[in-house]
Image: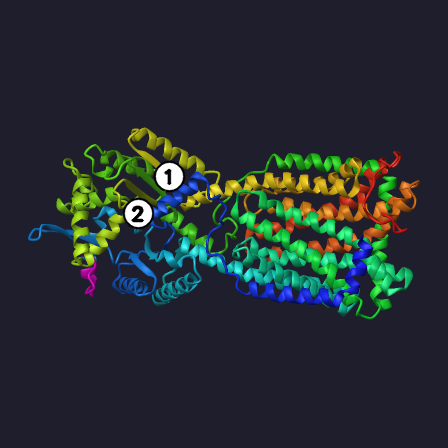
Amino acid sequence: MWKNLAKFVLRFKWLLLALLLVTTVFMGYQASKVKLSYEFSKAIPSDNVHYTDYLSFKEKFGDDGNLLVVGIQTDSLFQINNFLAYKKMMDSLRALPNVEDILSIPGAITLYKNDFEGKMEAVRIFSDSIATQEELNTSKEVFFNLPFYKNLLYNRATNAYLMGVRLNKEILNSPLRTEVVGKIVKVVDKFSKATGLQTHLSGLPLIRTLVAEKVKKEMKLFLFGSLLFSVLILLLFFRSLSNMLLSLAVVAIGVIWSVGAIQLFGYQITLLTALIPSLVVVIGIPNCIYFLNKYHTSYLSNGDKQQSLIEMVSKMGVVTLFCNITAAIGFAVFAFTKSDILREFGLVAGLGIMFIFVISFILLPAIMSLLPVPKPRELKYLQSNWINNLLQKIEYLVFEKPKMILAITGITLLIAIVGIFRLQSVAHILDDLPKTDVIYKDLKFFEQNFKGVMPLEVIIDTKKPKGILQTSIDIKAIARFEDSVLAMLPDIGKPLSVIDGIKFTYQAISQGTGDSTYTLPAFGNPMADLHKSLRKLQLKKEAGTMDKNDTAMLKLVGSFIDSSEQYLRISMSMGDVGTKRLPIILDSIQKQADRIFDSSYKVTLTGSSITFLEGSKYIVNGLKESIFWAFLLISICMIYLFRDLRIVLCSLLPNIVPLVITAGIMGWVGIPIKPSTVLVFSVALGIAVDITIRFLVNYKQVLAADATNKEAAIRTTIKQTGLSIIYTSLVLMAGFIIFCASSFGGTFALGWLTSLTLLTGTATNLVLLPVLLNYLGNRKDKGKIKIEDPAGRE
């Protein structure tokens, strides 16, 4: 069959090349339209209860991740020049497009009771006309006597101050967010230069934007870096410009098709899908090496270009096909998980690898048939002295020291298994960024001074519309839940709800100051009074008579009570505590809520922090699923290919050992299992199995000529396959090492851990696999394989 396919490709090469060109143009057009994702990892399944709770929350109260925060730490903010500069920064930020609101000290208000109109009015504490230090000091005393702002806009103990910038949620998932965030950063930098004060920026809008931009830059870095590595290795290997350019053409077309597939599936470029172009290059180059190596070996043997091309396709077609299938399986198994981001990555990466097979199967023989025959210098690599010496040593170890090899393997496995028991599973929202990165350091600033910026929401459901108006609603229980539970947690920032608004209002009515009067009224139903005020505002809105204060009040209350007046929101921020501590914190909050509130209430915890936790769980659990599916599908491929259970078992063991060693090293070094490191195992397994297939296929082909001497077949296989296996392994390791240049910890780990796994996989397949085959040598091999033997039979 494969000979006929080879003849078909060579006969209809112009038609096939035209089809490749048309398809590449079409996929290139699709690739030009692909967009960058500005969302956090879509790791949580859409039917997960925590995700549906989060969507329900967003429907009622809007996005919880649209607040960007600016922080400073100084004891001189209230010096007149610094304060005026701080106020100027606030005004400049408010004037920017898509900035909806600013929460800051210069814009802080107090409430004043207008006895003539019988209503409360909001009055700015710091007027626009402040010009002297004395005026500022007076306003400063008023501000610090209002407990509402304590630990919200300032931390008196550390002299830290916070300014919140609320962005239009519609632009958060669009490219406009980069422009908006860039303008905010410029305004803040201008303030910093004018005052000499260091500023810190954080919040999900900033984090998402800067991370997305880093992904965009690194995608280009990895693509060009992997191409550069490939160029150097191909030139060193083949000493041929035409072979190098032809190989680059294969992977370049593969990259175009893969990025085009991202667009065709309706996906976007994420932290994971950004790796696909580089992975296509890294995995595509060995395809070219396998084909070219076989062509050169055949030409050196028979001197016939046409016959050598036919042998190249017929002998290496099935090998490369199954190598690509197993490599694709290593990625495609992620499509079986419930995590959207893994499913997208797995599907496109798996297809991209199969694209490479189709492209190389057509392009290489078609173009090479038009090129001159190989020159002697292009075949010189086949006689590499250092490779031959290394292979002789491997052959010596296999046949003279098999017990030593098995003993070393056993001891290494025992040490690795101990390391596996030390493995931990933990993830943080920003743990993939180095601790020296400004995004990470600024996040820690807000955690140290304001307990964090990651959103956490509590929704209290009264279980019926207008439920918050019922006289039975226990607002003191809600206040107790805020003050004695939420506010006491070390990793939770100041909680905010309408309860705080009621306390603030009551303090103004009683004309009190300080903590003693910041409390709930002893009598009446404040919620009913709040409803009356809201009703008046709604009537004003319908009549078109609302003023600026009315609009702000209606919007503010609407942020904490939904339109049906059934749900009440308590909003807070928290630190990036990680997936190990977060469940403990949430469980503690839920238990306290169940203790304080009776069955007439339903308390739900939600927010971006919780969806991140759940998404991380699904990704880590997806590791177990992906490894299971990878082993199952690869085993099926092996059974189909070799039709011998003993050989299948021999083939899997040399690929299990590297995975166990890598997991053990992660345990000993302290690298946790997290969303960014789970890729290593299935990816490395799929690629390492390629080496096994290459070795075993050649072994069966040699054995087909003489089935009586299996030891000789193993020796011949080591010599014939060792060179291409070592070179392709070096290409793969070098290709993955490029990921170590990443500023993301997970991508960095993917680079060196995958390279390490491939290194150990190469060693086990060239040393341990022949030992296992040799032990089976005294038994009659009844296995069959669907590969043509030298006589051309199947």
Report x, y in % for residue 552: 23, 55
Task: Give the quarter of the image for residue 568.
Answer: top left
Residue type (three-letter) at the residue carrying disc 2: Asn
Please name whichever residue, 733 or 350, is drawn nearer the observer in this view of the structure. 350
Is disc 2 placed on a helix, strand or loop?
loop
Q: Nearer the viewer, residue 317 or 405?
A: 317
- Give amino acid for label 1: Leu
Q: Residue at x 31, y 59 (%)?
A: 100
Q: Is residue 394 magenta?
A: no
Residue at the spot of label 2:
151
Q: Is residue 682 left or right of residue 529?
A: right
Q: Is residue 88 left or right of residue 694?
A: left
On screen, residue 67 above or below 365: above
In three-dimensional space, the C-alpha distance between marks 1 and 2, rounded to whole angstroms, equals 22 Å
Q: Residue 124, labelled with which disc?
A: none
Find residue 184 and report its image quarter: bottom left
Q: Mark 2 Cα within 10 Å, few/some/many (few <14, many 20+)?
A: some
x and y, in percent, of residue 545 in the image: 16, 58
Q: Which residue is drawn at the image coordinates 71% and 36% (left, top)?
A: 413
Q: Which residues are magenta?
A: 122-136
Residue 718 visible in the shown view: yes
Say whether marks 1 and 2 touch (CB < 8 Å).
Answer: no
According to the image, label 1 marks what residue? 605
Looking at marks 1 and 2 on the same chain, the residue that comes earlier in the sequence is marked by 2
Name above or below for residue 544 compared with residue 593.
Answer: below
Identify the secondary structure beneath mark 1: strand
**Image depth: mark 1 or mark 2 in front:** 1
- Figure disc tally: 2
